[in-house]
Amino acid sequence: MNAVSDVVLPKRHRVAQRFYTLDEIQRILEAAQELERTLYCLAAETGMRGGELCGLQVTDFDLERGLVRVNRSVWRGKIQSTTSEHPDRCIALSPQLLYHLAEYLRRWKPNEKGWLFATRNGTPLDQNLIVKRKLQPLLISLGINRGGLHAFRHGNISIMDRFGVPLKVRMERIGHSDPALTLGPYTHIASEDDVKFAEQLGEFCAQMRPNRKKKGLPLAGNPL
């Protein structure tokens, strides 16, 4: 007889992932200094992983076509292939980010390998040091809950969901092959969306109760 045959293990609960809201991203970008500001801009708009951001080289950008190619990652100074299900993907960049990149490159100091974000020795930046020395102190000064570079990635996917970006486009930009992953732990609903839904639901319900128009009852507005 198996002594543990009747033992029921507790269900594993998924830990909520930290993500930056649109308001938090705007505040971070406004307060950040270079070169971190450019790195955060890319993180927020593209949803790239920290290692992918640190692995970017100038030659990965096609500013005329407005694209960036993602095909490598850097972890603790070591170059490796990206962990994405799409190891060689291209991401479209907004005109605003392209302008920002052009300005950044005018002041960029060339290094042997052409790293976009490099140390004084010409080696790629370490994402852990960026978070520890730059991002965390900035978040504390702004009164924003702590988070790492990956919170930009989670925020990016959540904002795409909020803007109604087609799932296929979201998956291609973020490098996912499983739609359940993009729609599951990587998509978060911001609290302001919850409030907006509650207001819309209240208006909708008020329309369904025409005989209960009492003082204080929300007026009918646009239905869901």
Image: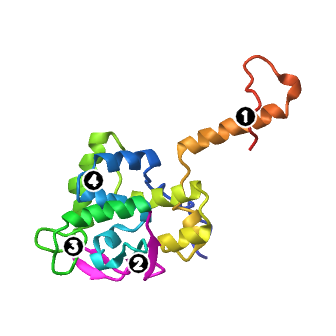
- Say few, some or many: other residues with alpha carbon within 10 Å of mark 3 (under 14 / 14 to 19 / 20 or more): many
Q: Which residue: 43% across, 66% down?
A: 93
Q: Which residues are magenta?
A: 69-94
State which tag comes first along the sequence, 3 or 2: 2
Numbered badge on residue 83: 2
For disc 1, the marked residue is 202
State which tag comes first along the sequence, 3 or 4: 3
User: In which quadrant is the N terminus drawn?
Assistant: bottom right
Look at the numbered disc 3 and give the secondary structure of its residue: loop
- Front tag of 3 and 2: 3
* Marks 3 and 4 close (CB-CB < 8 Å): no
Query: Can you give x and y, in whole percent of width and height, for residue 25 in the image?
Result: 40, 50
Query: Can you give x and y, in whole percent of width and height, for residue 171 in the image?
Result: 54, 71
Numbered badge on residue 124: 3
Q: Is residue 37 above or below residue 214?
A: below
State which tag comes first along the sequence, 2 or 4: 2
Inter-mark Cα distance, 1 to 3: 52 Å
Instruction: Examine the rendering and report whether any part of residue 114 can be seen.
Output: yes
Task: Name the amino acid, label 1.
Answer: Gly
For disc 4, the marked residue is 135
- Say few, some or many: other residues with alpha carbon within 10 Å of mark 2 (under 14 / 14 to 19 / 20 or more): some
State which tag comes first along the sequence, 1 or 2: 2
Inter-mark Cα distance, 1 to 2: 44 Å
Inter-mark Cα distance, 3 to 4: 17 Å
Look at the numbered disc 1 and give the secondary structure of its residue: helix
Task: Name the amino acid, label 3.
Answer: Pro
Query: Can you give x and y, in whole percent of width and height, for residue 142 in the image?
Result: 31, 41
Does the segment drawn in magenta span residue 92? yes
Which of the 4 image quarters holds residue 10?
Answer: bottom right
